[in-house]
Amino acid sequence: MDFKDTPEEAAYRAQVRDWLTANAPKHGFPLDTSKPDYMPRAKVWQAEKAAAGYACITWPKDWGGQGGTPVQNVIYAEEEGPYQTPSALFSIGLGMCLPTVMTVADEATKTRFVGPAMRGEEIWCQLFSEPSGGSDVAAVRTRAVRSDDGSGDWIINGQKVWTTGAQFSDYGIIITRTDPDVPKHKGMTMFWVDMRDPGVEVRPIHQMSGGSKFNEVFITDVRVKDSQRLGAVGDGWKVSLVTLMNERLSVSGVRPPGWPAFLDAARATPEAMQDRALREKLADWYVQAEGLRHTRNRTMTALSKGETPGPESSIGKIVLTDYLHDLSSEAVDMLDQYGIIDDPALSPANAAPQAMWVGNPGLRLAGGTDEILRNIIAERVLGLPGDIRVDKDVAFKDMPRGR
């Protein structure tokens, strides 16, 4: 594993750093998406990134990218990280939805959507999870059936849940059930849908963190053209894997807050540093943070060599969620009575520990639950026998309703 940039990578990092110094928002970006000026400012920033070639670095130049390498993309993300920018608003569309569109859609669809999404003119969401399916994407019950008027159109009905950013989105990719007479992995088809269609209702979910980034989405008699289909009929599972692979790599790439910041806070309270249990936890967090950093370096090294990263993303995400839970729990405890106050204006450290603590359970679900990822590690890394899947060869219509 090589922890250092190659000369070419170092030059690219310097180029990115210079551009961000000159162009990134000088005073940060407001995190409150309810502010009336949030969306216009976010779109201006995205347009500036696109014009400079940094919106989608690995995409072909013909589509507005740099035709760059995955490691260049990682370098840019690392350098932009310290800045408070609205990049997360566009990450699902550009990191998950549009790569799927570019992989399986026809040329007319790609020409219509790639450019506007890259420039921040249109926002996309991912309509996968359902109340009865959870992380089992193949358990979807949202139905798409051919219209009986002979037009070739499809009529979609169903419900999705935990859809991030649906309230801001113009379009979305949706996985549906098109054939209930075959096993669940074989009867799905993916489409793109207009989120402004009258048959699409978005209901934000109020989270315990105070935010509402997730949503319920109800789809009622939404008519889509067959040209909105992404991939062949019945190939929805195969197409969805393109999206999920990008999602899990994206989530696992989250860089953990540095434990040194916590150490500095603890040092400011001399009696805290006399606590042996706290010192032991600091040592544990150091080990975990370094493990995450070197796992990320392993991924970067593979990308730099043109190789495909292994299962590090699954391992890294599981370690990250445990790390964040332990760190934030201890930080809230150290705040004593202030730990129950989540108002940034009243609590030390702008109530960041409280926000981390209540937000961490959502990270355990995003990009595949901890349980799903542990199965991946067990089967693909450790070589353990796979789970017994009694529904593997059962037609979806014959499965128990509870599945």
Image: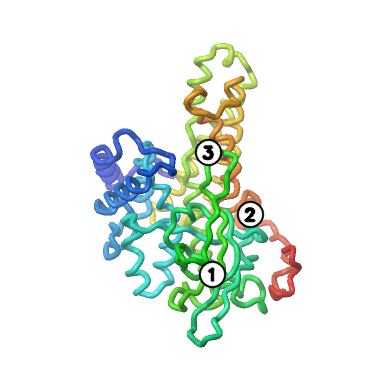
Q: Quadrant of residue 94?
A: bottom left
Q: Which mark is residue 291?
A: 3
Badge 2: how crowded within 10 Å, few (<14), some, or many (20+)? some
Left/right placement of residue 188 relative to residue 132 reads left
- Sequence-wise, the earlier of marks 2 and 3 is 3
Q: Position of residue 356 (x, y in %)?
A: 54, 35
Q: Which quadrant is the C terminus positioned in?
A: bottom right
User: Mark 2: which amino acid?
Assistant: Ile
Distance in Å between CA atoms under marks 2 and 1: 18 Å
Q: Position of residue 377 (x, y in %)?
A: 61, 52
* Residue sitting nearer the eye, 114 or 225: 225
Q: Which mark is residue 238?
A: 1
Q: Position of residue 121 (x, y in %)?
A: 33, 57
Q: Quadrant of residue 143?
A: bottom right
Q: In front of the other: label 2 or label 3?
A: 2
Asked which secondary structure carries label 3, the reply is: helix
- Sequence-wise, the earlier of marks 1 and 3 is 1
Q: Residue at x 44, y 40 (%)?
A: 32
User: Mark 3: which amino acid?
Assistant: Gly
Q: Position of residue 126 (x, y in %)?
A: 50, 59
Distance in Å between CA atoms under marks 2 and 3: 21 Å
Which residue is disc 2 drawn over?
A: 372
* Residue sitting nearer the eye, 158 or 333: 158
Q: In front of the other: label 1 or label 3?
A: 1
Q: Which mark is residue 136?
A: none
Residue 53, placed above or below residue 227: above
Left/right placement of residue 196 relative to residue 16 reads right
